[in-house]
Image: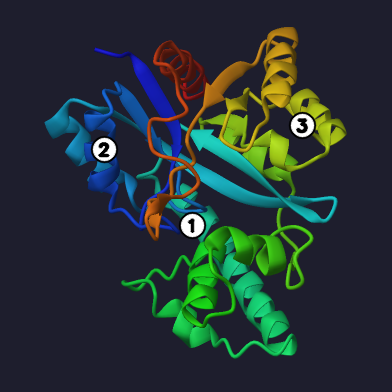
Amino acid sequence: MQQNADLHTHTTASDGTCEPKENVRIAKEAGLAALAITDHDTVAGIAEAKEAGAVLGIEVIPGVEISSVARGQDIHVLGFFVPYEDASFQEKLVGLRETRHERNKLLINKLQELGIAIKLEDVYKRKQGTDKNIGRPHIAEELMELGVVNSIEEAFDKYLGKGGAAYVNPPRITPQEAITLIREAGGVAVLAHPGLYDDDELVKELIEFGLDGIEVFHPDNSQNQREVYRKWAEEFDLLVTGGSDFHGWRGEEPFHAMLGSHTVHADVVDSMREIANRRRK
């Protein structure tokens, strides 16, 4: 049996299309030993995933992907072994989701200014339940349905991603504040997909500030970037993590990549657990 872990996956608790238990089932089929549930600014999917993991023999690492902003772009910080059942920690995430909602409204407004007949209420109908943790992929789906774009990738390239015609960035916490939030809660802070930011000076600043690790193996990191970030991890004694950033399926294709396609050895999970245990003593 493989002893690998996929440390970056999303569920219907945020902008994934699979229920948390489905992520666990896929991890089992992929022969993984562990996976992390790292939904955007919420821990709502973790309890269900852990229950499924107990049945299927898969370790589920409670995680979160916190949204922050630096130098005009989104910066995401992964938190592992976070206290997902703690009310005060959950409350801190509520404010982050409210900012996400404001960002969505601004995005829709800009799309409307571009002459696109998209409505906020139609986007929000795409997610069931009372906790409307809507992300840009939901907006991209609506753009596809309206015939504005042919794919999620095109929606991000033309409109929603950095440099897109409707890209917006409302005030959010800084990545330094995100790192502090995770560490003070007893979790482990890792910079998500650093290759996306095109700002290695910022990556270095965050390493010096107090990151515990860096996501080296991610579908959006080039081979050259992986080599650079692995070298920095060794130099600064950081954890080397990796994950697929699986969001389920958009059409017939997995988004961003198939669960289990980007992994690290499960020893990394043990190292994370040791850090988290030390912080909570």
Residue lying at 68% horizontally and 81% vertically, measured from the top left: 111
Q: Is residue 104 above or below residue 113?
A: above
Q: Is residue 150 left or right of residue 129?
A: right
Circle 3 residue: 206
Going by the numbered disc 1, the residue's amino acid type is Glu
Q: Is residue 253 left or right of residue 209?
A: left
- Secondary element type, mark 2: helix
Q: Residue 118, percent across and down? A: 57, 86
Instruction: Give the number of the disc on residue 91.
Output: 1
Is disc 3 in contact with disc 1, using a CB cutoff of under 8 Å? no
- Secondary element type, mark 3: helix
Within 10 angstroms of label 1, few (less than 14), some, or many (20 or more) residues? few
Circle 2 residue: 26
Residue lying at 77% horizontally and 53% vertically, measured from the top left: 73
Which of these two is toward me, 273 or 217? Answer: 217
Image depth: mark 2 or mark 1 in front: 2
